[in-house]
Image (spheres, rainbow, N blue to C red):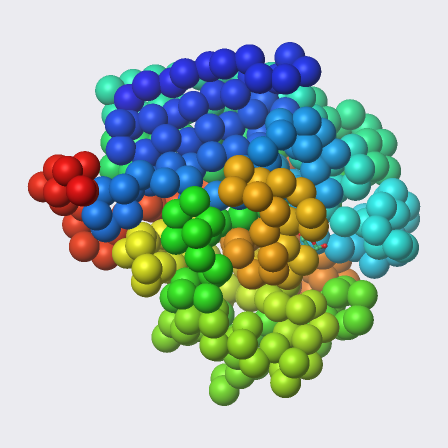
Amino acid sequence: MDIYVKEVVRGWKEFTLTNNIIEISILNFGGIITKICTPDQHGNTENIVWTFNNYYDYEKNPLYLGALIGRVSGRIPDGRFKINQQAYQLEQNEGTSHLHGGSDGFHQILWDTQIKKTESTAELQLTTKDIASSGGYPGCLNVSITYRLTKENEFSIHYRAVPDTATILSLTNHTYFNLSGNMKNSIYQHHVTIPSSTILELDNSLLPTGRLLDVTDTAFDFRSGALLRKGLKSLPDIKQLALADGYDHYFVFENKRSYVDVYEQTSGRTLSIETNQPGMVMYTANQGSQGYALTDGPLPAHYGVCFETANTPLALYQDKLPSMIIQAGALYDKTTTFQFGTRQPFSSANKNRTSNQ
Ligand code: G6D
């Protein structure tokens, strides 16, 4: 296990965690994951996440590329919510909605950092004291987020926070994955399994209508696994997909601990996601990289997929969904783990064959 640190731009630091099979790079600015390099089934190590070509593009980062999202991920209608009858008004940074924690959200924070290495783990801890009124949220919030890589190719993000005043909270990470490697193919050949029988219906502004839709016999039924190609290719005929030009929907989980599995057919790469969050937005990068140059140039729609494990702002209006209100002094404690691998066990023999080619 090793941890490398380098200064990049604007005094930002990039930390690279490695176990000599996988390398994961993270900025202290926004907790942004800038790179995840893993081997495919033939031992070719490639980058499997979107990376800006120019570090300065992470400054405004309208794609929230790779970033920590908070205090609340997703869209809050009119930026308004109530806690114990006290009304709050958040910044309306997308039309009249509040999106992804606002323009001063967690993706814009320069986090304090601490690194820790053992013989089996490499970790980067990010901490901050989120001040009152950042974006209009109540009170101050002590936040500690730990990125940990293990020898077994497991990468976890552990979110902990304690507010001094009751607040709403739903933290996530907004990394765009593409397991084909170096973004060489679209995400069509990503086979995804999601243990969810309901999604939140969206309106034209991509806000939840309040209705939960049964996924049975729809392009949202991933309970037995399906290729993303299937839904994305039938886009115009499926109202909910046509609304967002792809998937941008919240899948409600039924268990306290849930597993999402991804297998990419061209590379043989697998990704297994375990979380104790109550659900997840799957977003298939429906606007592409919006002209931003990534390491492999600008990308069209459906060349990346985000698995934003989190709560949903609809929980502010619907009691049957788990609350996102955290009382003063209470601990917010969520973990999402990404297990990287390949369908055929990666072996050094494969690697030798590849390197001789
Ligand atoms: C778009 O609707 C999507 C969001 O879900 C996504 O997080 C954002 O782009 C980056 O607004």
Report the front residue among 143 and 91: 91
Q: Is residue 127 visible?
A: no
- Quadrant the C terminus occupies: top left
Front residue of 351 and 28? 351
Residue 182 placement, left or right of 170: left
Give left or right: position of 178 versus 101. left
Horizontal side of 37 relative to 15 (left or right) equals: left
Instruction: Name the residue rendered at 56%, 66% in the picture.
Output: 251
Q: Residue at x 53, y 54 (%)?
A: 304
Residue 330 pos. (x, y %): 63, 36
Q: Ligand 1 falls in which quarter?
A: bottom right
Residue at the (41%, 40%) spot, across then down: 47
Figure label count: 0
Residue 91 in view here? yes
Q: Position of residue 161 (x, y in %)?
A: 61, 32
Q: Is residue 340 left or right of residue 53?
A: left
Residue most toward the left? 349
> The N terminus appears in which quarter of the rendering?
top left
Please say if 114 is above or below 20.
above
Residue sitting at x 47%, y 34%: 35
Give percent across and percent down for residue 83.
81, 48
Q: Identify which residue, 233 or 165, lies in the foreground.
A: 233
Residue 211: quarter of image? bottom right
Please identify the quarter of the rendering in which residue 112 is found: top right
Q: Is residue 58 above or below residue 346?
A: above
For residue 62, above or below residue 216: above
Outermost residue to the front? 357
Q: Quadrant of residue 226?
A: bottom left
Question: Where in the figure is residue 159, as x and y percent of width and height?
Answer: 54, 36
